[in-house]
Image: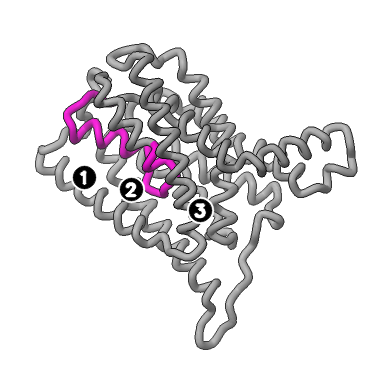
Amino acid sequence: MSWFESFILGLVQGLTEFLPISSSAHLRLTAAFAGWHDPGAAFTAITQIGTEAAVLIYFRKDIVRIISAWGRSLVNKEMRQDHDAQMGWLVIVGSIPIGVLGITLKDAIEGPFRDLRLIATTLIVLGIVLGFADRLAARDESGGRHRAAKQRKTLTDLGVKDGLLFGFCQAMALIPGVSRSGATISGGLFMGYTREAAARYSFLLAIPAVLASGVFELKDAGEGHVSWPPTIFATLIAFVVGYAVIAWFMKFITTKSFMPFVIYRVLLGAALFVLVGMGVLSPHAGESAG
């Protein structure tokens, strides 16, 4: 991998990790369109450490407060009723599905799941799901001629059941094209949470999963055409760009609809099907050396 490739892929990772459009799919597609080798699941997992570092800094006050309360709840029973302490446990509970499925499906994640036809399918299907979820949230927030606006849930309403459901939604992102934020936010909207609450828990829930995945894949970073220096460079680029994107996105979702992302996903998936069907792109472009 050249320095230019690592710069572009790091930029793509930072731009797409927090948006509901799938960073893993865009890394895969960027390489396929450019005629580069598929950077692979290991490269993707490690560069995600950069974007998760951006989450740690952006949500640092929340994270410190949650970890502190959770730690005290281990020895103080009264603290177990504290919302921040409960949030610590809920992040752990919500991380179980992706941890189990990530290990179980490791070979599929690194192989069949990277087929461009599957990525096109997940881009379209999850785009439609996100669209329905967004319309449902908008209807509740605005009400209508014959009904009042409906109060949506916040993170203070989050319990073990919803935490696990969020976790299973996050686990769907093991398939490129699904999008970690897209799946968890969609799930949260269907469960009745506000956009801001669903996004905030989505980002917090991703921290242990992404960091664990990145550390687990460290041993494979230097294999094939991907070496350590370009991977580290791409990770740093992803961190800088990712921080800017998450700050923008958290402001965006408080007043805007997800429909631009829905339209983008559907159009990109459809275009990908056309290009593969016409033979312009191979479903396995770059995989042989990736």
Whether residue 183 is visible to the viewer of this picture, yes or no, is no
Query: Is residue 34 inside the magenta stretch?
Result: yes
Q: CA distance from mark 2 to mark 3?
A: 22 Å
Give the amino acid at mark 1: Leu
Task: Find out whether the residues at labels 2 and 1 contact each other: C-beta distance under 8 Å.
Answer: yes
Give the amino acid at mark 3: Met
Residue drawn at the location 56% of the way across and 30% of the way down: 99
Q: Which residue is mark 2?
A: 123
Give the amino acid at mark 2: Leu
- State which tag comes first along the sequence, 2 or 1: 2
Q: Which quarter of the figure is the N terminus placed in?
A: top left
Which class describes the residues within 10 Å of circle 3: few (<14), some (14-19), or many (20+)?
some
Local SS, label 3: helix
Q: Specify the segment rendered in magenta.
A: 14-38
Q: Which residue is mark 1?
A: 272
Which class describes the residues within 10 Å of circle 2: few (<14), some (14-19), or many (20+)?
many
Residue mark closest to the camera, 2 vs 3:
3
Residue 118 position in % (x across, y down): 30, 40
The secondary structure that dominates the magenta segment is helix
Local SS, label 2: helix
Q: Residue furthest bottom?
A: 146
Residue 19 position in % (x across, y down): 41, 48
Q: Residue 250: give its label.
A: 3
**Residue 15 falls left or right of residue 8:** right
Residue drawn at the location 57% of the way across and 37% of the way down: 57
